[in-house]
């Protein structure tokens, strides 16, 4: 199971942004471990840097949530089928 940046869901401004990363790992516990690890953060930082954000760092808490096949956040996992898990990684340009 791998990680994939969802470029169309990412926002990157001059000083900050949000990088959205998806895993197709169906198990919630394993998906959370994948999306919370240092590799996910590095991937987000590298992507932000490739899009012009100078020396990006993580700025806040990574939000992880399940989504359906259309990428819409699941609010009731007992009634909705989980297709993927997303991580929203907040990033900010280095102040140095």
Image: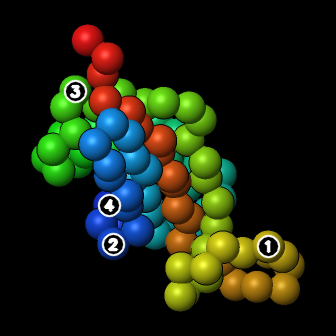
| Callout 2 touching callout 1 (CB < 8 Å) | no
Q: Earlier in the sequence, mark 2 or mark 3?
A: 2
Q: CA distance from mark 2 to mark 1?
A: 22 Å
Label number found at residue 8: 2
Tell me the residue that label 1 is attached to. 75
Would residue 27 appear left or right of 17 to someone viewing this image? right
Label number found at residue 5: 4
Q: Is residue 39 above or below residue 82?
A: above
| Callout 2 touching callout 3 (CB < 8 Å) | no
Q: Residues within 10 Å of mark 3 (few under 14, many from 20)?
A: some
Residue in the picture at 39% in, 52% down: 19
> Secondary structure beneath disc 1?
loop
Q: CA distance from mark 2 to mark 3?
A: 22 Å
Q: In the image, residue 43 lies at what x, y percent?
A: 28, 43
Say which quarter of the image contains residue 5: bottom left
Front disc: 2 or 4: 2
Q: Is residue 74 in view from this perspective? A: yes
Quarter of the picture containing the C terminus is: top left
Label number found at residue 38: none
Q: Is residue 2 in view from this perspective? A: no
């Amino acid at each position: 199971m791998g990680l994939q940046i969802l470029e169309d869901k990412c926002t990157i401004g001059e000083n900050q942004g949000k990088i959205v990363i998806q895993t197709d790992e169906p198990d919630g516990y394993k998906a959370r471990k994948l999306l919370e690890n240092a590799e996910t953060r590095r991937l987000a930082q590298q992507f932000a840097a490739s899009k012009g954000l100078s020396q990006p760092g993580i700025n806040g808490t990574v939000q992880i949530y399940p989504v359906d096949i259309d990428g819409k956040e699941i609010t009731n996992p007992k009634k909705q089928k989980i297709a993927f898990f997303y991580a929203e990684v907040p990033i900010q340009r280095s102040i140095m």
